[in-house]
């Protein structure tokens, strides 16, 4: 101990962020600012489209953290979207809470529910874990379909007193001179923007932390990571619970915006898991940049092709399969092949 | 009391259907460690195929499934050879995501071709025929046939696995892929044969799915979950275990439904989770994975 005091303290500086991330960081701040101000000029449709883009991106980042890093390939994240949505309805309609507070609480309760859920599904490994999470999501759906005060199998709607009790609606209405429904969308837009930025920041800081290093190690070579003393079970559990909390909050926000919930929609595997997986795979799994690209691509496809119904979904499925077979690192992987850039410096090139 | 005995008998027989769903999944996992998320949709696809053959050619579904069997084998062989063999490897993600994509394609393809209307396979008086057991209890002929077919499929699969050269190759590739390759086993062909065989089982499962109840393009994922639950409850790697798993699931569902009709599916899922908590490796485990 003594001679370490005698020597000049050695300091290390490890840089994972080169020039591109710094420029990217400034651009990111700029983009967030522009997005924050967008509702002042944008049409109501565009505002609604962006809310959709934001929550899909946030869900995709969560699933990517879970599957791309922790190796927990879940097909059951709709469990927490639906749980969050239903908690929002229960806390506001029955509990009389303010919707924003309800969103936060939905996150906490989702995490609390995720813990016992994890203890069961973690007994299944690999691909079996995937189907196990799906079974759990079905259990959640069937249980909520039994709760009569929340509408049972047919679902229920938020009263307008709840939807207009979100703080800020009055001010926005007065300030921007819009009607109440438009003001409601704008406030939801800001909440969604906050949530997506918070999710990005949370994922970013988790991945930059010591835990994140361990996660990267698990992603690259699980056996080797375990050999080097990474407590895989604990880290996976922590990631599962953390993503459940984030997913629950996003679910609460989604259903605050939709103002109508039913078990089949809230626990839909297509809407809340299949699309999300598609976004992550198209963009590039196991990177933070991938889901961002994937979300934009998905939004554009949804906007221009969704009218084709079944054909659109067949196209999505085919595209997902082709990407998985021929470009498993997604669009971001293709960009990396062409030029080595990093936007989120999380220590993996 | 009669009601409860009836529920138990129906539950056991329902287990036969679930065992048929699960046998194909069990086969795919046993040979190529493939967990096929499109399994349920493939069963529904096969049911529509039987329906199409039966109506177009004016055949009875039982005959139609015989006609469809070689076609199904070729389809399965091709699917594995062209698509799924490319996804196998150390990484879990490609097979999961490719079969998940396949599931969405099949569902929507069926929706586009056959519409969302629910359908049923028609086979005349046998559909409603039943054998009275006395005391007001009767068993339907179709549920009974389902169970007998499930047992026959399992006996046949066990025979193929343990008594034939191709079965030896199945077991060899399953036990140690590298060594099997060294011994000159063409694992890609073996996998394709296994998938062809799984498709034939899927065809039989589809026949009874369509005879026993209505089906439409969206019901695939739920059948996947039942099949999966039966496999896990029974324990990986044993076909008889899968039958037991199917029966446990069927019993849980009919007993749940007897308490409250809305609890049927939920009771099945809860039984599955309970087995997972108490005996994570299933009731009759064999494989180590």
Image (cartoon, coloured by chain):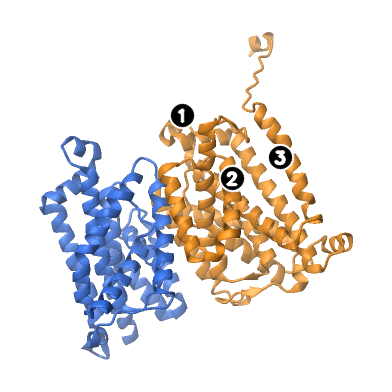
Element type at mark 1: loop
Which numbered disc covers residue A54?
none
Same subunit, tags 3 and 1: yes
Query: Seen in the image, is A267 located left or right of residue B30?
Result: right
Residue extending farthest to the right is: A174
- Real-space Cα separation, disc 1 to disc 2, in angstroms: 34 Å
- The blue-tinted chain is B
Going from N to C along the chain, the mark reached first, 1 or 2, is 1
Residue assigned mark 3: A28
Dots 1 and 2 on the same chain: yes
Q: How far apart are marks 2 and 3 (CA)?
A: 14 Å
Report if residue A122 is visible in the image.
no
Mark linked to residue A228: 1
The residue identified by callout 2 is A293
Question: Label 3: chain?
Answer: A
Location of residue B48 in the rendering, given as x and y in whole percent from the top left corner: 33, 72
Compared with B287, B3 (above or below) is below
Sequence-first disc among 2 and 3: 3
Label 1 lies in what chain? A
* Number of other residues with Cα within 10 Å of mark 3, as a class: few under 14, some 14 to 19, many 20 or more: some
Q: What's the CA distance linking mark 3 and mark 1?
A: 36 Å
**Where residue A188 sits: x, y (%)?**
73, 59
The residue lying at 78 percent from left, 72 percent from top is: A161
| Display colour for chain A | orange
Q: Residue at x 55, y 76 (%)?
A: A153
């Amino acid at each position: 101990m003594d001679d370490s005091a005698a020597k000049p303290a050695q300091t290390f500086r490890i840089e994972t962020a080169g020039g591109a991330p710094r420029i990217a960081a400034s651009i990111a701040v700029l983009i967030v600012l522009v997005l924050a101000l967008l509702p002042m000029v944008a049409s109501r449709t565009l505002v609604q489209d962006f809310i959709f883009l934001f929550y899909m991106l946030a869900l995709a980042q969560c699933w990517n953290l879970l599957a791309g890093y922790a190796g927990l390939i879940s097909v059951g994240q709709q469990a927490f979207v639906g749980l969050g949505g239903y908690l929002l309805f229960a806390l506001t309609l029955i509990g009389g809470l303010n919707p924003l507070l309800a969103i936060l609480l939905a996150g906490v309760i989702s995490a609390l529910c995720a813990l016992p859920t994890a203890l069961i599904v973690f007994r299944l490994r690999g691909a079996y874990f995937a189907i196990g999470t799906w079974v759990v999501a079905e259990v959640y759906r069937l249980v909520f379909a039994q709760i009569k005060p929340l509408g049972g199998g047919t679902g229920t709607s938020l009263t307008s007193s709840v939807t207009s009790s979100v703080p800020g609606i009055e001010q926005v209405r007065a300030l921007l001179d819009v009607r109440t429904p438009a003001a409601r969308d704008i406030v939801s837009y800001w909440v969604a923007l906050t949530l997506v930025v918070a999710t990005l920041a949370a994922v970013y800081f988790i991945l930059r932390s010591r835990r994140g290093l361990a996660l990267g190690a698990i992603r690259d070579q699980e056996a080797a990571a375990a050999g080097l003393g990474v407590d895989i079970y604990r880290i996976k559990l922590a990631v599962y619970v953390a993503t459940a909390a984030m997913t629950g909050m996003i679910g609460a926000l989604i259903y605050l915006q939709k103002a109508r919930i039913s078990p089949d929609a809230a626990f839909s595997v297509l809407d809340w898991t299949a699309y999300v997986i598609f976004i992550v795979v198209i963009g590039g799994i196991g990177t933070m940049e991938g889901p961002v690209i994937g979300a934009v691509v998905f939004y554009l496809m949804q906007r221009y092709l969704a009218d084709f119904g079944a054909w659109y979904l067949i196209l999505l499925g085919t595209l997902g399969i082709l990407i998985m077979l021929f470009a498993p690192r997604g669009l971001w992987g293709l960009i990396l092949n062409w030029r080595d850039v990093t936007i989120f410096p999380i220590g993996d090139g | 009391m009669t009601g409860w005995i009836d529920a138990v008998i129906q539950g056991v027989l329902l287990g036969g259907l679930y065992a048929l769903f699960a046998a194909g999944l069990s086969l795919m996992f046993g040979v190529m460690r493939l967990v096929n998320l499109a399994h349920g949709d493939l069963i529904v696809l096969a049911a529509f195929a039987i329906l199409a053959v039966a109506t177009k050619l004016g055949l009875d579904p039982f005959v139609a499934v015989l006609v469809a069997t070689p076609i199904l084998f070729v389809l399965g062989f091709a699917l594995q050879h062209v698509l799924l063999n490319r996804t196998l490897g150390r990484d879990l993600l490609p097979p999961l995501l490719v079969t998940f994509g396949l599931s969405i394609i099949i569902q929507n393809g069926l929706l586009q071709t056959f519409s969302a209307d629910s359908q049923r396979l028609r086979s005349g008086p046998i559909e409603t025929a039943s054998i009275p057991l006395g005391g007001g209890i009767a068993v339907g002929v179709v549920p009974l046939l389902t169970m007998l077919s499930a047992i026959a499929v399992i006996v046949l699969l066990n025979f193929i696995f343990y008594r034939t050269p191709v079965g030896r190759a199945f077991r060899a590739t399953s036990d140690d892929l590298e060594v099997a390759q060294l011994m000159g086993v063409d694992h890609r062909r073996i996998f394709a044969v296994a998938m062809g065989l799984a498709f034939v089982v899927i065809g039989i499962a589809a026949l009874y799915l369509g005879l026993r109840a209505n089906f439409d393009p969206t019901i695939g994922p739920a059948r996947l979950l039942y099949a999966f639950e039966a496999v896990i409850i029974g324990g990986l790697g044993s076909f008889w275990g899968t039958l037991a798993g199917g029966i446990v699931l069927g019993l849980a569902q009919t007993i749940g439904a007897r308490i409250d009709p809305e609890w049927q599916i939920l009771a099945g899922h809860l039984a599955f989770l309970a087995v997972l908590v108490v005996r994570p490796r299933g009731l009759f485990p064999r494989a180590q994975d």
